[in-house]
């Protein structure tokens, strides 16, 4: 049935976002009904008008025309702040490729209304003389519980109910009896669940370290003044603060936020890892008190709901969290600050595959706000935009309080092997750890993996233990358990090879647990803390480990990537990087950039206090440019060489890239669909190549590097072009093709996902 129809989502804030309802768009509203707008529609048997949002517009009726109702009106006056996020969802759908519903789920997560938390107390209603008379009466009647409660109320006036029923052991029946006598009343006050668990004692103890009024050095002051000055002058360019490790980028953030609060604005501070929440929160709490809150996945539903309510009521000025904190509904947002902006975690791996950086810029433009990026190792995209004038660049080239960058030593592990050292620790690193233990100084040992061993293989026949559901090897964990890090499949370890029966089947490569064992063996008196994905599964585990290390309860902190991201431990004078090559030789064009960033960030944890710092990089490839530049702490040198390769091969940021993932439970069906999409894009390439040098570069289809995950077969197509808009047009043409095939009942069994400028290999 021809006509114009709209799929409507009903009452986004209250309903589950898993169903749309189709309505007819009447001719009188044809020009006003667009994706994302708020409309009123007759809903249910009583045809009561309800508010909804347009998720999709099409020309095909899904039901018989007589069963469909018409949209009543476009409710422009009701769209207010929420409409901004509907518009944002529409933008994300177009920019990154997804359904409108998944985009809406991202920007407006379902906020299940939670019951308010109440704090109850007992309040004395009698004047002191009357209360004392009643107390004497209770004592004479041997009513000891009543007497005990009255005695405390005469002294305090009001008592929290947990104290009454707990410490004083007063039953609710006794409380009600005194309440019926008019002696007291119970008072219930609404209270918010507070995820900020910082005591006044902790805040006071860190006051000297962080300080309320820390003096900025000239470079920091120039950055803060420049950012706020541009804001006052109406300029809304994104700013990039490129500052070496320990140069005080956070102090600039604090100054900018303080300026925004004076201007009646609020701020969102994004951090790449939940593990960084407590340390970042503590610094902001010391400066801004309880006007700071957090938002992340470890919060309970009640805590999340309460923080959203506090934001809407204007009780919070700053929210700290990972990329999902972008969507906190501040009424007067002034600044979005993205710390460690180079981190991969700022790119969503779920649909829509948005990047926090570009999405923050879109949100800022909708709220007349600014975006500030900061990193010691900026992403090539951010630095490229700064070099080409799109971003405003500020540089911090000196560490705070006179401390210097650490001395870095590169150890060639090939030479160590030649000389008979098969330990995880080179002789140089071993000696330096012993020195730190003797001096009561701390060390960090960084390994870029988790688990016990990389894979388990038979020395006799070469058989590798693999996951039956994914095209990857199983990793060995403590106790011999084998686990798949993609689907979670587990099985007991094996003593004999299932292929040839040989007993020589063992794990390859060291993981954090094995290194921990080696540390205890080599340094038996050392206190060690391990921090990786396996040791931080509980809600407060990050804080517990980091607090223990900060308080000097351990000599050595061993861990994976999460220990090298932004942490500040003044007593750490040594960082050992045990396997610099693990992130280098992987199937990913960003491997060099990622390795340089990891090594530089890891090295930056050393020598942040008054003592000097030293770093040992252990590698089998000491001549690789990523390792050479990291050892020199030379970001600009690395940038120039890496950009040369990116320009030669048309990789971001020299060009843009669209990754198209075709997935299917049936291998042949998935391959067939991927081939059809490839043919469509190559035809489009042929049309575009008529424009001088402006054709699409289409690579594939081919099996993904991990060809199967959870019994789903995966095929990849890559499309490159310098114009991002051309890739969006290519994505749109694929979406239109898939929709047409679905309407005609010719769809193959499979799904298609889009990823623009991907940061992870497939």
Image (spheres, rainbow, N blue to C red):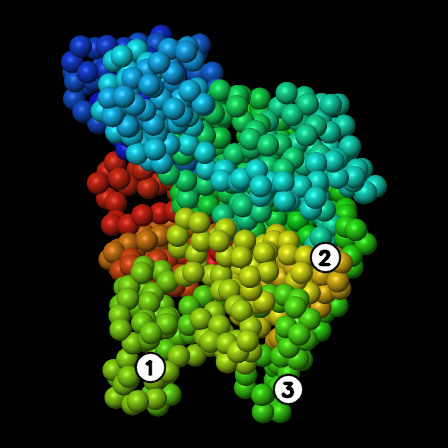
Q: Residue furthest right?
A: 218
Q: Against 80, is 735 above or below?
A: below
* Left or right of residue 495: residue 527: right
Identify the element where label 2 is drawn.
loop
Marked residue nearer the N-terminal end (3 or 2): 3
Identify the element where label 1 is drawn.
loop
* Residue 663 point in image, percent of width and height: 32, 53
Q: Residue furthest front?
A: 140
Query: Which residue carries the number 2 mark?
Result: 609
Viewer-side label of 1, 3: 3
* Residue 71 point in image, percent of width and height: 30, 13
Query: Which residue carries the number 3 mark?
Result: 415
Residue 43 position by quadrant: top left
* Left or right of residue 9: residue 716: right
Residue visible at 28% across and 66% down?
490
Looking at the rendered image, the quarter that the C terminus falls into is bottom left
Q: How many marks?
A: 3
Query: Which residue carries the number 1 mark?
Result: 463
What is the distance, in whole Å, between disc 3 and disc 2 at their CAs?
A: 33 Å
* Left or right of residue 177: residue 413: right
Residue visible at 36% across and 22% down?
150
* Residue 39 point in image, percent of width and height: 35, 15
Looking at the rendered image, the quarter that the N terminus falls into is top left
Q: Are marks 2 and 1 in contact (CB under 8 Å)?
A: no
């Amino acid at each position: 049935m021809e006509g114009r129809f709209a799929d409507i989502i009903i009452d986004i804030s209250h309903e589950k976002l898993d169903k749309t309802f189709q309505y007819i768009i009447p001719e009188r509203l044809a020009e006003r009904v667009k994706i994302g707008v708020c409309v009123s529609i007759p809903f249910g048997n009583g045809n009561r008008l309800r508010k909804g949002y347009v998720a999709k517009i099409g020309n095909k009726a899904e039901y018989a025309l007589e069963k469909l109702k018409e949209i009543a009106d476009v409710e422009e006056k009701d769209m207010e702040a929420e409409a901004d996020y509907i518009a944002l969802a529409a933008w994300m759908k177009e920019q990154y490729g997804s359904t409108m519903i998944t985009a809406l789920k991202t920007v407006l997560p379902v906020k299940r209304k939670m019951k308010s938390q109440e704090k109850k107390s007992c309040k004395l209603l009698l004047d002191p003389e009357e209360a004392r008379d009643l107390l004497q009466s209770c004592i004479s009647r041997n009513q000891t519980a009543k007497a005990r409660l009255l005695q405390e109320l005469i002294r305090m006036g009001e008592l929290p109910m947990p104290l009454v029923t707990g410490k004083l052991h007063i039953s609710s029946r006794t409380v009600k009896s005194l309440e019926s006598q008019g002696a007291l009343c119970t008072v219930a006050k609404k209270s918010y669940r507070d995820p900020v668990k910082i005591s006044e004692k902790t805040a006071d103890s860190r006051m000297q370290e962080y300080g309320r009024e820390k003096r900025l050095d000239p470079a920091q002051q120039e950055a803060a003044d420049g950012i706020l000055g541009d804001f006052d002058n109406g300029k809304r360019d994104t700013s990039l603060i490129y500052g070496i490790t320990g140069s005080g980028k956070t102090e600039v953030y604090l100054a900018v936020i303080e300026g925004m609060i004076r201007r009646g604005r609020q701020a969102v501070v994004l951090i790449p890892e939940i593990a960084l929440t407590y340390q970042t929160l503590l610094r902001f709490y010391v400066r801004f008190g309880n006007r700071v809150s957090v938002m992340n996945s470890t919060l309970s539903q009640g805590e999340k709901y309460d923080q959203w309510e506090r934001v809407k009521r204007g009780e919070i000025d700053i929210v700290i969290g990972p990329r999902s904190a972008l969507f906190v509904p501040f009424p007067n947002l002034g600044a979005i600050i993205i710390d460690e902006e180079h981190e991969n975690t700022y790119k969503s791996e779920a649909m829509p595959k948005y990047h926090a950086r570009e999405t923050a810029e879109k949100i800022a433009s909708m709220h007349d706000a600014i975006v500030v990026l900061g990193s010691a190792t900026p992403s090539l995209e951010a630095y490229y935009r700064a070099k080409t004038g799109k971003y405003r660049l500020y540089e911090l080239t000196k560490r705070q309080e006179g401390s210097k960058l650490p001395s870095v030593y590169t150890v060639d592990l090939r030479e160590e092997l030649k000389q008979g050292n098969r330990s995880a620790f080179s002789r140089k690193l071993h000696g330096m750890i012993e020195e730190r233990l003797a001096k009561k100084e701390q060390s960090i040992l960084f390994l870029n993996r988790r688990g016990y061993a990389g894979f388990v293989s038979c020395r006799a026949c070469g058989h590798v233990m693999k996951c039956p559901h994914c095209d990857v090897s199983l990793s060995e964990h403590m106790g011999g358990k084998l686990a798949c890090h993609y689907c979670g499949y587990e099985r007991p370890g094996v003593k004999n090879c299932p292929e040839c029966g040989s007993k020589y089947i063992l794990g390859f490569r060291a993981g954090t647990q094995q290194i921990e064992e080696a540390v205890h063996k080599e340094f038996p008196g050392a206190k060690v803390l391990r921090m990786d994905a396996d040791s931080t599964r509980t809600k407060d585990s990050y804080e517990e480990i980091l607090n223990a290390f900060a308080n000097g309860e351990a000599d050595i902190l061993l861990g994976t990537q999460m220990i090298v991201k932004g942490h500040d431990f003044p007593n750490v004078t040594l960082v050992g990087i045990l396997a610099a090559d693990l992130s280098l030789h992987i199937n990913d064009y960003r491997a060099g950039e990622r390795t340089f960033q990891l090594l530089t960030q890891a090295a930056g944890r050393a020598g942040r206090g008054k003592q000097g710092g030293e770093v040992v990089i252990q590698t089998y490839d000491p001549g690789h440019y990523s390792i050479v530049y990291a050892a020199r702490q030379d970001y600009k040198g690395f940038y120039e060489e890496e950009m040369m390769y990116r320009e030669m091969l048309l990789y971001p940021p020299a060009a843009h890239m669209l990754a198209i993932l075709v997935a299917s439970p049936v291998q042949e069906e998935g391959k067939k669909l991927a081939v059809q999409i490839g043919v469509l894009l190559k035809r489009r390439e042929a049309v575009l190549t008529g424009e001088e040098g402006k054709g699409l570069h289409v690579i594939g289809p081919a099996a993904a590097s991990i060809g199967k995950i959870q019994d789903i077969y995966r095929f990849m197509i890559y499309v490159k072009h310098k114009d991002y808009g051309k890739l969006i047009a290519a994505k749109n043409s694929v979406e239109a093709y898939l929709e047409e095939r679905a309407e005609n009942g010719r769809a193959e069994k499979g799904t298609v996902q889009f990823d623009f400028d991907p940061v992870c290999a497939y």
